[in-house]
């Protein structure tokens, strides 16, 4: 007890010292022209590199003046909305899109088939890896469990340290293949050891797509409908890559630029993505929606829904932070193209799952929230729902546990991380080393 008391006393002192000596005035950022968070005063990202992998558009410039426009996202020069729509209704697009992002070209039918076969035969973990690594020290934090597994996989790779391009491609493809297994098996271990539920370890089926395998491995009875797998497949396509400037992709670039290995770079990206300011947005949306359902009786009554949204914005409801989660984006203004193409699939799934009433609530929030935010926050650039507004709803309808929401993001984004790691190795070959301006006061020893 004495040790615990002393520890708490010391922590209080140490915390006060850190707050006192690590706080930097906002005025100093302005004085030296430093862009906090690598974003300028208008919220635009500071240019830190070049990429040929993807592009985001949210503004157009006319006569030197920026005007908000409907958001667009391109993968290797192709509009992501067109890519999703180009996938035949009875086909899945994750693998084809992964090929495009990684290698820069859309595959022929033969190339796509060979690529799918390669991913299928790579969906295999080392002998006893599931038992000796994933099931040991199970955790509710599946992102941490996956990161531990990624770093452990490095010890099974005799060419772990080689950054020769062909070797890096092999490592990345292996990780793309096993990520669903690391996530689902990590969840089952937690569900068994921490929640005392039954454990199911289903091996992936080489004949199935990534989305199908994910649902099959997750569910005790292995069963799923085509529509369920199709909607999950679209979600994976839309989360696969996003412009290169997001936090976890930049982390991949930074670690790669130092000459570090693939496993370390991807583990670092995982650590970035799990942050609630980055990969956990859909979880916050789901928590907010649960709260709204508890306080709104008629989901179709726009007046009642709007009144409660106003309370949320005024900091009087939900988490008192004055935010309607899932609305607005750091880059997009008028619309998020991922949300626009995803919504039709969400609607189809809501009908199949008899969740039309919930869909009506989402629709009303999508209509009312931008109006209320513009009025109360004086935001005129445009506020629209982002893809995370609906992704959590989809995962809930699919019966995917909350603990797997961010890991599913990672299962998709590992493709984008891999593409940027390869591009960094081939095209940059220079360590990323930003500069910090010291505002420290010099002192003399007495």
Image (spheres, rainbow, N blue to C red):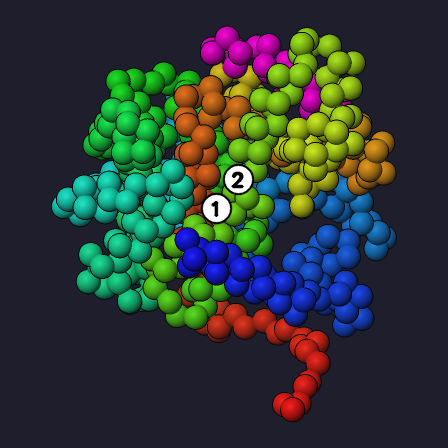
Give the image location of residue 311, x and y in percent: 76, 26
Q: CA distance from mark 2 to mark 1?
A: 7 Å
Give the image location of residue 268, x and y in percent: 43, 57
Q: Secondary structure at mark 1?
A: loop
In front here: 438 or 345? 438
24 on left or right of 272: right
Res. 274 mark: 1
Q: Are marks 2 and 1 in contact (CB under 8 Å)?
A: yes
Is residue 241 visible from the viewing direction of this image?
no
Q: Residues within 10 Å of mark 2 (few under 14, many from 20)?
A: some
Pointer 2 residue: 280
Q: Residue at x 32, y 51 (%)?
A: 148
Q: Residue at x 69, y 22 (%)?
A: 365
Q: Residue at x 68, y 8 (%)?
A: 298
195 on left or right of 72: left
Q: Is residue 364 magenta?
A: yes
Magenta range is 350-370
Q: Secondary structure at mark 2?
A: loop
Question: Where is 230 relative to 257, above or below?
Answer: above
């Amino acid at each position: 007890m004495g040790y615990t008391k002393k520890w708490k006393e010391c922590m209080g002192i140490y915390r006060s010292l850190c707050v006192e000596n690590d706080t930097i005035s906002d005025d100093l950022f302005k004085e030296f022209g430093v862009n906090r968070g690598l974003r300028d005063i208008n919220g635009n990202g500071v240019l830190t590199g070049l990429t040929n992998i993807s592009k985001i558009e949210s503004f157009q410039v006319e006569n030197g003046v920026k005007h908000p426009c409907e958001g667009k996202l391109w993968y290797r020069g192709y509009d992501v909305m067109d890519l999703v729509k180009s996938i035949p209704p009875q086909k899945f697009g994750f693998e084809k899109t992964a090929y495009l992002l990684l290698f820069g070209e859309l595959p022929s039918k033969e190339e796509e088939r060979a690529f799918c076969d390669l991913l299928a035969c790579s969906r295999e973990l080392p002998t006893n890896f599931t038992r000796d690594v994933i099931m040991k020290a199970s955790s509710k934090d599946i992102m941490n469990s996956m990161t531990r597994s990624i770093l452990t996989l490095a010890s099974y790779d005799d060419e772990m340290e080689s950054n020769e391009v062909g070797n890096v491609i092999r490592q990345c493809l292996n990780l793309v293949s096993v990520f669903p297994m690391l996530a689902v098996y990590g969840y089952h271990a937690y569900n068994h050891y921490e929640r005392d539920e039954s454990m199911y370890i289903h091996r992936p089926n080489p004949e199935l797509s990534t989305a199908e395998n994910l649902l099959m491995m997750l569910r005790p009875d292995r069963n799923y409908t085509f529509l369920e797998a199709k909607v999950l497949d679209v979600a994976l396509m839309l989360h696969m890559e996003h412009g290169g400037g997001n936090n976890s992709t930049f982390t991949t670039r930074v670690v790669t630029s130092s000459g570090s290995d693939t496993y370390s770079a991807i583990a670092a990206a995982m650590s970035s993505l799990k942050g609630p300011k980055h990969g956990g947005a859909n979880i916050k949306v789901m928590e907010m929606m649960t709260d709204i359902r508890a306080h709104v009786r008629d989901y179709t009554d726009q007046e009642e829904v709007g009144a409660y949204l106003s309370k949320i914005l005024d900091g009087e409801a939900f988490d008192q932070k004055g935010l309607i989660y899932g609305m607005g984006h750091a880059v997009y203004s008028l619309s998020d193209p991922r949300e626009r193409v995803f919504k039709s699939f969400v609607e189809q799934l809501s009908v199949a799952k008899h969740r039309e009433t919930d869909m009506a609530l989402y629709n009303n929030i999508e209509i009312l929230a931008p109006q209320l935010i513009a009025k109360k926050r004086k935001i005129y650039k445009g506020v629209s729902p982002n893809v995370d507004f609906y992704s959590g709803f989809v995962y809930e309808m699919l019966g995917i546990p909350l603990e797997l929401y961010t890991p599913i993001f990672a299962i998709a984004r590992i493709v984008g991380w891999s593409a940027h790691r390869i591009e960094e190795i081939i095209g940059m070959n220079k360590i990323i080393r930003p500069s910090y301006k010291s505002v420290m006061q010099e002192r003399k020893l007495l």
